[in-house]
Image: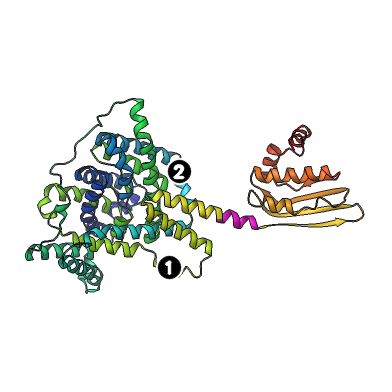
């Protein structure tokens, strides 16, 4: 236990402190922007980011991953805030946390194994595009100073690591933010700053129980929003955990992460914050800056609230161009450039799944819809492919006038037509043997196909024997099949 705590919290102290500082600075404009999207005061997003980051550092299942207020969640809150106000949003945030904790206990995090690699790649690429697109308003209708500062920021981010000694000692995104802020203040440049995005809070968050009626009407109002927030939050968190797992070559506890996200959202709701989840952009900033442990996430949340409450005058001077440069770096680093090169060698179905996921997420700005479409397409392609791996051969014993059909492969809804079409019902025979020793029946469609084959042969006056069913197939056949139940066959025939 002590060894695990030491490993997760204190094995990378220096880098965790520095990376957490960089993430805190990058969280400020994001939290403010997401608050504006949701239609609430900037402090709601900032308080949420502080609470969620600090709480998830203790309860999350993925060390080094950053969770806070996010754009994907903010988009789902717009209508609720507009129609019912902030108090109902806080209540919905609490219920979201409850659903996520239940998901953790029900081990729904394990469902991530059904999300294919192509869907994850599409999700990552779409998120990279959305991160870049979110920076475009800061780069349109602006003076040349903004472009110059952004270009200089990107130059610092990518070239600073090549400096001897110091280049490896400090995270280049932090150097970029400090350097460009100093330049803007010394030269007195008239460019957009963090302070222009909204008023920063001047007090620490306090306990706030949502002032809503505790009745069924309130539950019916917040229930659909809470369910949506819970699903999107867990999807984005699980996807981000997968990506951080790969970047750090470590593993995470997905079900613990579900519970941690729920606890963090309950904490945020009780402190006047909106619901949030894992952030792929900030998580990648953290990892790229050297952050690996829980300390980096804790420092990000703690330093965020210290900055906005006690150093607000300085933080408000940070030029948005510096943070835009950092986020462009994140979008470039997030995008899977290999997926473009792999389009030629990957199967067409894989490419369609990846591109469709990207297109739907970018078009709807809803990660859940994009992932759902990707998973659905991947499942259909998989089912179609597996359905092809079924073959039926036959041989006839002239002495006994018996034909034996040997079925090899998987029989389920996509292969049922092929299964039925493989039998010759017009051949004059005394007996047919259907050998299923190398086949597996998966669903009621497969059992129904077997029923049709047996009943058709018997209708032609042929004796039919089914042999070789494995235990799993026999279980569903015995339970559902009608060909060996005379009264059910009569009903079937009567209906036809």
* Image side of residue 484 versus residue 279, left or right: right
The answer to whether residue 48 is above or below residue 343 is above
For residue 462, which quarter of the picture?
Answer: top right
Q: Mark 2 sits on what residue?
A: 108
Q: Secondary structure at mark 1?
A: helix
Distance, label 1 to label 2, CA atoms, is: 32 Å
Looking at the rendered image, the disc whose residue lies closer to the viewer, 1 or 2, is 1
Is the C terminus in the top left, top right, bottom left or bottom right quadrant? Answer: top right
Q: Is residue 452 visible?
A: yes
By secondary structure, the bulk of the magenta-drawn segment is best described as: helix
Magenta-highlighted residues: 381-388
Q: Is residue 250 visible?
A: no
Residue named by callout 1: 340
Position of residue 201 measured from the top left corner of the image (x, y, whole percent): 15, 44
Q: Nearer the viewer, residue 372 or 318?
A: 372
Q: Position of residue 316 (x, y in %)?
A: 13, 54
| Front position in the image: 382 or 283 | 382
């Amino acid at each position: 236990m002590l060894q695990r705590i030491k490993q997760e919290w204190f094995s990378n102290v220096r880098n965790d402190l520095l990376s957490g500082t960089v993430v805190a600075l990058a969280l400020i404009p994001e939290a403010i922007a997401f608050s504006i999207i949701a239609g609430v005061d900037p402090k709601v997003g900032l308080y949420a980011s502080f609470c969620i980051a600090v709480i998830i550092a203790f309860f999350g299942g993925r060390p080094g991953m950053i969770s806070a207020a996010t754009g994907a969640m903010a988009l789902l809150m717009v209508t609720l805030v507009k129609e019912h106000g902030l108090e109902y949003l806080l209540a919905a945030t609490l219920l979201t946390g409850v659903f996520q904790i239940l998901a953790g206990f029900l081990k729904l995090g394990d469902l991530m194994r059904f999300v294919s690699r192509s869907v994850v790649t599409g999700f990552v690429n779409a998120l990279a595009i959305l991160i870049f697109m979110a920076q475009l308003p800061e780069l349109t209708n602006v003076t040349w100073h903004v472009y110059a500062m952004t270009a200089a920021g990107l130059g610092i981010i990518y070239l600073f690591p090549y400096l001897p000694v110091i280049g490896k000692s400090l995270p280049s995104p932090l150097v970029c933010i400090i350097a460009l802020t100093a330049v803007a203040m010394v030269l007195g440049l008239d460019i957009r700053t963090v302070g222009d995005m909204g008023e920063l809070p001047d007090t620490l968050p306090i306990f706030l129980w949502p002032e809503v009626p505790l009745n069924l009407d309130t539950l019916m109002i917040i229930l659909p929003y809470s369910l949506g927030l819970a699903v999107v939050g867990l999807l984005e968190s699980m996807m981000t955990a997968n990506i951080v797992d790969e970047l750090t070559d470590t593993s995470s506890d997905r079900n613990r992460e579900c519970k941690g996200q729920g606890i963090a959202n309950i904490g945020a709701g009780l402190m006047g914050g909106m619901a949030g989840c894992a952030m792929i952009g900030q998580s990648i900033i953290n990892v790229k800056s050297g952050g690996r442990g829980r300390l980096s996430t804790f420092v990000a949340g703690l330093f965020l609230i210290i900055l906005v409450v006690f150093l607000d005058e300085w933080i408000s001077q940070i030029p948005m161009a510096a943070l835009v440069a950092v986020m462009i770096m994140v979008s470039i680093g997030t995008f899977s450039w290999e997926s473009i090169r792999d389009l030629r060698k990957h199967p067409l179905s894989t490419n369609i799944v990846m591109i469709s996921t990207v297109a739907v997420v970018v078009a709807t700005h809803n990660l859940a819809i994009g992932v759902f479409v990707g998973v659905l397409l991947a499942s259909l392609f998989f089912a179609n492919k597996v359905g092809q791996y079924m073959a039926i051969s036959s041989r006839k014993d002239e002495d006994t006038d018996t034909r034996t059909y040997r079925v090899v492969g998987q029989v389920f809804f996509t292969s049922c037509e092929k299964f039925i079409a493989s039998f010759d019902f017009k051949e004059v025979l005394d007996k047919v043997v259907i050998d299923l020793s190398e086949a597996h029946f998966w669903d009621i469609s497969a059992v129904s196909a077997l029923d049709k084959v047996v009943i058709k042969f018997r209708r032609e006056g042929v004796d039919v024997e089914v042999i070789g069913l494995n235990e799993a197939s026999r279980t569903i056949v015995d339970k559902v099949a009608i060909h060996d139940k005379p009264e059910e066959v009569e009903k079937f025939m009567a209906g036809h």
